[in-house]
Image (cartoon, rainbow, N blue to C red):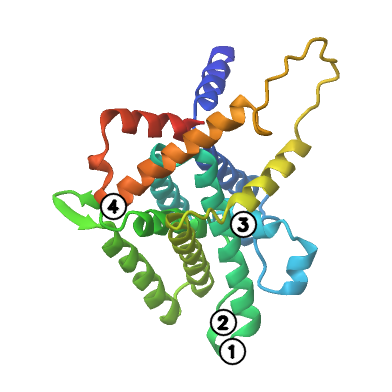
Amino acid sequence: MTSLTHDIKDKLKHLNVFEKIIALNVLVFFVGWLLRVLRRIPRERTLDWLELPNGFSDFIVKPWSIFSYGFAHYDPLHIIFNMLVLYFVSRTMVNLFPTKQSLNIYFMGIIVGGILYLLAYNIMPAFFVDKITVLVGASAGVNALLIFICAYMPYREAKFFTVKIKLWYLGVAIVAFDLIRLFSGVNQGGMIAHLGGSLLGYAYATQLLKGKDIGKGFGKFMDRVANLFKSKSTLKTVHKSKKKAFAGHNKDEFNEFNNQKKVDLILDKISKSGYDSLTKEEKTFLFKSGKD
């Protein structure tokens, strides 16, 4: 048993950040399943502390749900589909873009999808939203990543078995399918969240192509939140080497700036000529940057 525990910990340690998110989603799903089986809790209440409610008054009581609903799934097919798509699309994202930026897109997609869901339920006519109850699932974040890639590299081709299709066709098909399901009355709340995620992904890509990263502020906020949970060392530093500054910036800051400029140039090349146009050195540099 000790050996098995060690093996599991070792494998978890080597997962990339999106694989850890997938593992967490699966864990939450099984916690809900166990509560239903062992405690006889109704299926629709096992994860109600994570669900995003449809009313503003209920949301105010549990504000964390604008984020946490993205980790809750009830239907096995729902979580299998979401996690499979997230696995494959995240592999492309972390190879082409910095991991932090990919996370910003994913979580901002979840939040924007949740906001659009709340607005739709509380603003739109009752006859249109009468079937909307609570929101669960990672689909908004997954859609944000998918549409981001489709909008950032529209002319890159994806291969489905023997058929090649340009990414912008795929993006249009995803949005069209969600709109059809929205007006057909099938899972309206979920479709509204899907469209919110897609909107975020498209906006992020179009702004990034113009040189503006709209997720920087969100990334800094998440860093502050993460720092709250980091343990601070009580040991005092005896010797501290100071790096010589130049024009108000140290060597590390210059290196970070130069690396980011190189990444931007490579991504610009991908958007114009496709991933296959990169040299071996450019692909290696982009891959290493995505792991940082």
Dot 2 corresponds to which residue?
Answer: 129
Q: Earlier in the sequence, mark 3 or mark 2?
A: 3
Tell me the crowding category of disc 1: few under 14, some 14 to 19, or many 20 or more residues within 10 angstroms, Cα based: few
3D distance between C-alphas at marks 4 and 3: 37 Å
Q: Quadrant of residue 153?
A: bottom left
Q: Which mark is residue 272?
A: 4
CB-based contact (under 8 Å), mark 3 and mark 2: no
Q: Earlier in the sequence, mark 4 or mark 3?
A: 3
Q: Which mark is residue 125?
A: 1
Along the horizontal axis of the image, is 21 left or right of 177? right
Q: Amino acid at mark 3?
A: Tyr
Q: Residue at x 45, y 35 (%)?
A: 290
3D distance between C-alphas at marks 1 and 3: 24 Å
CB-based contact (under 8 Å), mark 4 and mark 1: no
Dot 3 corresponds to which residue?
Answer: 69
The foreground one among 208 and 6 is 208
Q: Amino acid at mark 1?
A: Pro
Describe the element under mark 4 as helix, strand or loop.
helix
